[in-house]
Image: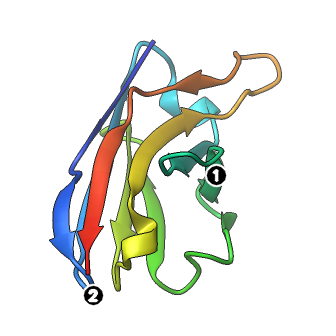
Amino acid sequence: VQLVESGGGLVQSGGSLRLSCAASGFTFSNYAMRWYRQAPGKEREWIARISRDGDLIDYADSVKGRFTISRDDARATVVLLMHGLKPEDTAVYYCNRQASAGYGGDYWGQGTQVTVSS
């Protein structure tokens, strides 16, 4: 099983980034996928979730209206589009495979750093 995040970087406040998570080693369509982030000195924070079929999407209040999660099962990829970035969005962003009954447990990527300058 592998989850590999990419797309992080340094961006100015108000800017945009596109994070991508490439999955391999498992049947991607069997799992809901989530994005989390962890800022220095803070606990890891859930920010977005997309269901297995993509019909159910949820966001944390802190990113609602600015971030968009999507998935492409053909490419086994989950994407997080981030607009209107703020300095408080600075964190390491992690892709997560949510445990799915009958299929497998939680799994994490290695993370990608997002830094938003003011």
Q: Position of residue 59 (x, y in %)?
A: 64, 69
What secondary structure is found at the residue carrying circle 2?
Answer: loop
Q: Position of residue 33 (x, y in %)?
A: 58, 43
Measure the C-alpha gap from mark 1 to mark 2. 21 Å
Label 1 Cα crowd, 10 Å radius (few <14 / some 14-19 / many 20+): some
Q: Amino acid at mark 2?
A: Gly
User: What kind of residue is marked 1?
Assistant: Glu
Q: Residue furthest right?
A: 101
Q: Residues within 10 Å of mark 2 (few under 14, many from 20)?
A: some
Residue 18 location, quadrant: bottom left
Q: How is the image coloured?
A: rainbow
**Residue at x-position 44% and y-position 53%:** 71
Q: Going from the N terminus, do you reach mark 1 or mark 2 first?
A: 2
Viewer-nearest residue: 51 or 90: 90
The residue depicted at 52 percent of the width and 26 percent of the height is 108
Q: Residue furthest front?
A: 41
Position above or below: 58 against 13: above
Residue 50 seen from this side: no
Residue 13 shows which numbered tag? none
* 65 lies above or below 19: below
Label placed on residue 45: 1
Percent x, y of residue 23: 38, 28
User: Which residue position holds label 2?
Assistant: 14
Q: Nearer the viewer, residue 116 or 4?
A: 116
Q: Quadrant of the C terminus?
A: bottom left
* Residue 57 in view (yes/no): yes
x and y percentages locating residue 48 in the rendered image: 59, 60
**Depth check, front residue: 44 or 30:** 44
Q: Quadrant of residue 49?
A: bottom right
Task: Check disc 1 and report its element: helix, strand or loop.
Answer: strand
Residue at the location (64% across, 52% down)?
Answer: 45
